[in-house]
Image (cartoon, rainbow, N blue to C red):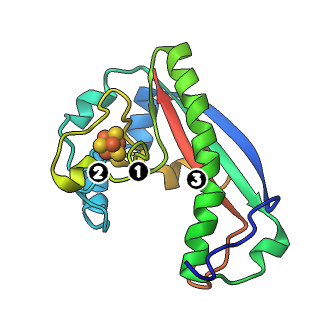
Amino acid sequence: MKGQFVDCENVYKTTTFTKTLSLDEFMKNYVDIPKFEIYCSLCKNYNKSWECPPHRIDVEKYWKQFDKIKIIAVKLDFTDDFRSKSYTSDELNYIIKNTLYVERSKLKKTLINLEDELDGKYLYGGRCDICEKCAKRTDEPCRFPDLMRYSVESIGSNIQKLTPDIFDFSLKWIEKDMKIPEYLVNVCAVLY
Ligand code: SF4
């Protein structure tokens, strides 16, 4: 698409934060399944991906298979110069794909290794990206049910509340000024 390319080389540095909590503590303070099902139902992508609500699984039972949660946040701090400009919607989509999603893919490798090490299951940060177009969109079964993982938020986690409590920073988003904020964060986890 014309005007879409933005140079995303050397425009951010990453810092990784981790914290392990007991599942009881996490669920008590940061999980509200019904509330997040309502939030998800308002999303334009609702019911378009198998890892998002409405779930086929009993979400409460899913959580209760595990004792602990290791939360991993990768924070991308953008340079002042990069954040000083306003971008078009296409450019912002391009930037997200080439910064936040690149780091999320790298994080996925760490999550898969941690699953092995801890004998757990990881929770991803956002929609499942295994297939280009999720099979749910065409009303077909998930193509890779053994590989697919739920996103942290889609099973009721309040990440917005969690991050300032355990990592001392709040989540930020792209605002109406169409600028990149000071930082963006990928939040994932491993249940074990
Ligand atoms: S593996 Fe494919 S079909 Fe299954 S949830 Fe992920 S994107 Fe959808």
Res. 101 mark: 3
Mark 1 in CB contact with mark 2 (< 8 angstroms): yes
Q: Residues within 10 Å of mark 2 (few under 14, many from 20)?
A: many
Query: Quarter of the image containing the N terminus?
Result: bottom right
Residue 164 relative to residue 116: left or right:
right
Q: Amino acid at mark 1?
A: Arg
With respect to residue 115, does 55 lie above or below? Answer: below
Task: Give left or right: position of 55 versus 98.
Answer: left
Tell me how far mark 3 sits from mark 2, CA to CA: 18 Å
Numbered badge on residue 49: 2
Image quadrant assignment for residue 90: bottom right
Decide which of tag 3 and tag 1 comes sooner along the chain: 3
Question: In this view of the protein, can residue 51 be seen by the observer?
Answer: no
Q: Residue at x 67, y 72 (%)?
A: 180
Q: Which residue, given by chain and number where applicable, does mark 1 sit on? A: 127
Q: Secondary structure at mark 2?
A: loop
Asked if one can make out residue 151 in the rendered structure from this viewpoint, the answer is yes
Query: Three-letter amino acid code at disc 3?
Result: Tyr
Residue at 38% x, 21% y: name it: 66
Label 2 is placed on what type of residue?
Answer: Ser
Residue 148, x across and y down, in percent: 36, 35
Pointer 3 local density, CA inside 10 Å: few below 14, some 14–19, many at least 20:
some
Q: Compare residues 44 and 131 and report the one nearer the observer.
A: 131
Residue at the image position 66 percent from the left and 57 percent from the top: 99
The answer to whether mark 2 is within 8 Å of ligand 1 is yes
* Label 1 – label 2 distance at C-alpha: 7 Å
Q: State the SS at label 3.
A: helix
Quick check: 120 left or right of 88? left
Would you call the spot at circle 1 few (<14 residues within 10 Å), some (14-19), or many (20 or more)? many
Query: Can you tell which quarter of the image residue 123 is in?
Result: top left
CB at disc 1 and ligand 1 closer than 8 Å: yes
